[in-house]
Amino acid sequence: MKRILKIMRPAALLALRAVLFVLPALLFVLTAASAQENVSAEEIVQKINQGQAVEIRDAIITGILDLTEINTKSLAKDRDSNRSYKSKVNVPLTFYNCTFNDGIVAYKVLENRGKSPQVLYTADFSKQVTFDNCTFEGMTEFKYSDFSESVSFAGARFSEPANFKYAQFHDRTDFSNANFPEDADFKYAQFQEEADFSSAKLRDDASFKYAKFKNKVNFQQTTFEGFADFKYTTFKTATDFQQASFRQGSDFKYTNGDYRL
């Protein structure tokens, strides 16, 4: 090898050295990627149904994780042909650096055997929920979900629209450094304790219309690249947007509380 290096031209020698320098790093990345295990959504549902806490790291979740079809599902309302079912996740959910290939569902609406109206399915969470640094390649549906304990999507990335409309957050909520390339819907959501959206990037439209922040909320260095709708939003404590960036305009008409832009 030393003899080959001596007879090579300087330019070729530099190129070879660059390849030799980069190759170990590339092999490390490929090895790390191949090390990620595949976990089926069905396996996760089975653990929930068995009352086991879920903690998964560095994995690829395959199949739609449908939390509306666990064994706690019960009829919530059946009046005037309006039927809805409620499921309750009674174990902690903890995911670190995972990729959800096909989406996660805590809300869905299905046809009532071809009849109108449709049937609503939702899921609530009685324990802590964590999706730190996770990537959601498919749908993310948490409309009407009730979170009893702390919730974290810190550093998460949502490839498709993220739906948290009407969600109830009873404990600390963390969306810091989250990335929303598509719409982020928090319309009518309620945050009982501190909420953190600092350094989050909302690249399309973001709706906090009618949302209620009943404790401190952090929007420091938050980037709104699409339209930001805070119309009728309520802030119970002083909220500072001075370090936030609004690229496509915002609406704070009829906003209640103390806030500074």
Image (tube, helix red, strand yellow):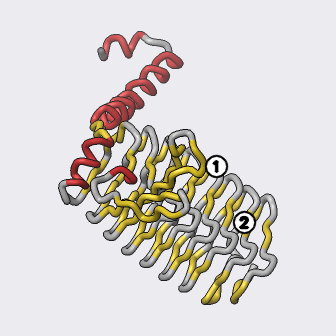
Relative side of 213 to 148, left or right: right
| 161 vs 138: above or below | below
* Residue 70 visible in the current orientation: yes
Q: Residue at x 52, y 68 (%)?
A: 167
Q: Distance between the residues labelled 2 and 1?
A: 17 Å
Q: Earlier in the sequence, mark 2 or mark 1?
A: 1
Relative side of 216 to 55, left or right: right
Residue 251, image x and y in percent? 79, 70
Residue located farthest toward the front when viewing the structure as drawn: 80
Q: Residue at x 36, y 64 (%)?
A: 129
Type of amino acid under label 1: Glu
Quadrant position of residue 27: top left
Give the number of callouts. Answer: 2
Q: Which image quadrant: the N terminus?
A: top left
The residue that disc 2 covers is: 245
Type of amino acid under label 2: Ser
Residue 112, image x and y in percent? 52, 45
Mark 2 surroundings: few (<14), some (14-19) or many (≥20) residues within 10 A: some
Q: Which residue is drawn at 36% across and 37% down?
A: 62
Q: Which image quadrant: the C terminus?
A: bottom right
Residue 109, image x and y in percent? 53, 49
| 99 vs 29: above or below | below
Q: Nearer the viewer, residue 46 or 194?
A: 46
Mark 1 surroundings: few (<14), some (14-19) or many (≥20) residues within 10 A: some
Circles 2 and 1: CB atoms closer than 8 Å: no
The residue that disc 1 covers is: 182
Q: Which residue is drawn at 50% across and 55% down?
A: 120
